[in-house]
């Protein structure tokens, strides 16, 4: 466990070896995953003639295991030896992902093979994500959790920027299948970095399993924490609203920018570059903003700000579309980034260590499931009522969800009873 905030000041993060290992892993892993995110759909198109439905289904398959298996993943993370789990998960990804370019070099991949590889890789990735969030408080002092989460987010952001560019170059030089070997190499490196983490991670928290003799009892114990802790329920509701609205908006964004607004390719590229700039600004601002406002208030202010910023997307149809969309990205990206970092840190500090895996898995399932649901619902509605009305509705859903963070506890309880 991390040191108490009242103890002697911990050493600076730059001397925290476990965190540095995790930052390097997140950087290399993010680059590898972004290359695969580009290469796998292109491989399905090139080798199997995939259309929009096939590509969409393949991408969705990578998210589905994390949603369906989240309760079991949470129990596994809370009871497992975390270092061994992280190492095994990373190195198991190598044959799973590597089987695709191997098949392409032999008789060619098949649809069942691609779907199986996507599902297995998605499940292993979900386990790793929950394990990392749950293990961080055990290698970083509580006083440094906020900047530590910012550092990990920053490393992933670099991968989000550089990964697609590297993937585009590799796929332009070779077939999409060999490009998948970049992710295999990233997982080999990641497993070695995880292996260098402290052996203390292989000792579960003292309370693990003390109040739960079976998996069912363990699940009930984790859900009891979420029912008991109002901030966790608020987080789930706000995340669901923001991701439903944001998923609908992101699913329509390129179509809207190209067909409705007539943006040139260079303008669309600049808009996406603004998102990367905004995310980087959010990483840098997260710690000072959360310390100035307090973690809880930072979550509330930034979540509502991110939800409100979505209204700028349909507002671009009124004029100055390019400038308005750049402004949207420069507002939404840092607000959403600070919100995510502060929310994760607050959850790590508030949740008992032996239950953190189950709580993280539940909230990860909410975040993972609502994005594709929002994208699908937004596309279906746009085909019937038009793109701009759906974008306005998506922003309203996001703002309503994040606004729930400000509801008085009595009102929130009434909303939950009505929903039940």
Image: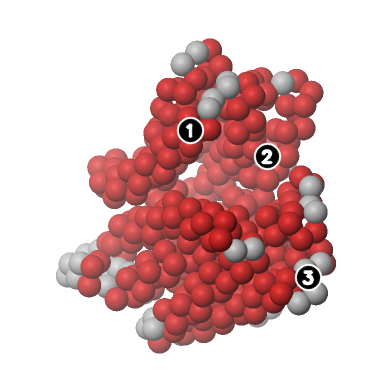
> In this figure, which residue is indicated by the disc labeled 2?
375
Give whichever of discs 2 and 1 has the lower sequence position.
1
Please say if the residues under marks 1 and 3 sit with CB atoms less than 8 Å apart.
no
- Quarter of the figure with residue 27: bottom left
Element carrying mark 2: helix
Which residue is depicted at the point 60% across and 77% down? 94
Quarter occupied by the N terminus: bottom left
For the residues labelled 1 and 3, the Cα–Cα distance comes to: 36 Å
Element carrying mark 1: helix
For the residues labelled 3 and 2, the Cα–Cα distance comes to: 31 Å
Q: Position of residue 7 (x, y in %)?
A: 20, 69
Quarter occupied by the C terminus: top right
| Along the viewing direction, whichever of 264 and 399 lies nearer the viewer | 264
| Along the viewing direction, whichever of 88 and 93 lies nearer the viewer | 93
Q: Is residue 324 above or below residue 132?
A: above
Which residue is depicted at the point 68% across and 55% down? 42
For the residues labelled 2 and 1, the Cα–Cα distance comes to: 25 Å
Q: Position of residue 358 (x, y in %)?
A: 58, 65
Residue occupying the far left of the picture: 8
Q: Is residue 142 above or below residue 257?
A: below
Q: Position of residue 381 (x, y in %)?
A: 75, 28
How many labels, in total?
3
> In this figure, which residue is indicated by the disc labeled 1?
266
Which residue is depicted at the point 48% across and 66% down? 29
Which residue is depicted at the point 40% across and 32% down? 331
Please say if the residues under marks 3 and 2 sit with CB atoms less than 8 Å apart.
no
Q: On the picture, is 371 further left or further right than 82?
A: right
Give whichever of discs 1 and 3 has the lower sequence position.
3
Res. 412 visible in picture: no
**Residue 400, numbered circle:** none
> In this figure, which residue is indicated by the disc labeled 3?
108
- Quarter of the figure with residue 398: top right
């Amino acid at each position: 466990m991390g040191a108490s905030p009242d103890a002697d000041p911990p050493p600076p993060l730059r001397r925290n070896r476990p965190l540095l290992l995790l930052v390097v892993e997140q950087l290399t892993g993010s680059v590898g995953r972004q290359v695969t995110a580009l290469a796998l759909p292109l491989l399905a198109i090139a080798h199997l003639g995939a259309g929009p439905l096939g590509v969409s289904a393949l991408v969705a398959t990578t998210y589905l295991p994390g949603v369906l298996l989240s309760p079991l993943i949470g129990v596994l993370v809370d009871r497992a030896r975390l270092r061994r789990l992280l190492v095994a998960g990373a190195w198991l990804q190598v044959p799973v992902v590597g089987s695709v370019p191997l098949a392409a070099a032999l008789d060619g991949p098949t649809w069942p093979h691609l779907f199986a590889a996507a599902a297995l890789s998605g499940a292993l990735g979900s386990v790793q994500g929950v394990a990392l969030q749950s293990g961080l408080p055990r290698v970083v002092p509580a006083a440094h959790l906020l900047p530590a989460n910012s550092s990990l987010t920053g490393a992933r952001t670099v991968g989000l920027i550089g990964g697609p560019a590297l993937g585009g170059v590799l796929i332009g030089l070779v077939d999409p299948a060999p490009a998948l070997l970049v992710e295999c190499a990233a997982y080999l490196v990641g497993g070695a970095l995880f292996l260098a983490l402290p052996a203390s991670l292989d000792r579960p928290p003292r309370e693990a399993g003390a109040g739960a003799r079976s998996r069912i009892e363990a699940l009930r114990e984790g859900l009891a924490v979420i029912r008991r802790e109002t901030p966790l329920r608020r987080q789930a509701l706000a995340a669901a609203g923001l991701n439903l609205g944001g998923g609908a908006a992101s699913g329509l964004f390129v179509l809207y920018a190209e067909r409705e607004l007539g943006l040139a390719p260079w303008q669309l590229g600049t808009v996406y570059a603004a998102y990367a700039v905004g995310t980087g600004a959010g990483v840098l601002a997260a710690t000072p903003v959360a310390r100035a406002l307090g973690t809880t208030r930072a979550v509330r202010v930034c979540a509502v700000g991110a939800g409100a910023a979505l209204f700028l997307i349909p507002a671009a149809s009124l004029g100055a579309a390019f400038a308005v969309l750049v402004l949207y990205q420069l507002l939404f990206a840092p607000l959403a980034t600070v919100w995510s970092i502060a929310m994760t840190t607050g959850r790590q500090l508030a949740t008992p260590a032996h239950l953190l895996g189950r709580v993280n898995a539940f909230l990860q399932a909410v975040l993972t499931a609502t994005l594709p649901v929002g994208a699908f619902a937004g596309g279906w509605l746009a085909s019937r009522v038009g793109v701009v009305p759906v974008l306005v509705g998506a922003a309203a859903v996001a703002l309503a969800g994040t606004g729930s963070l400000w509801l008085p506890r009595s009102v929130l309880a009434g909303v939950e009873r009505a929903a039940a």
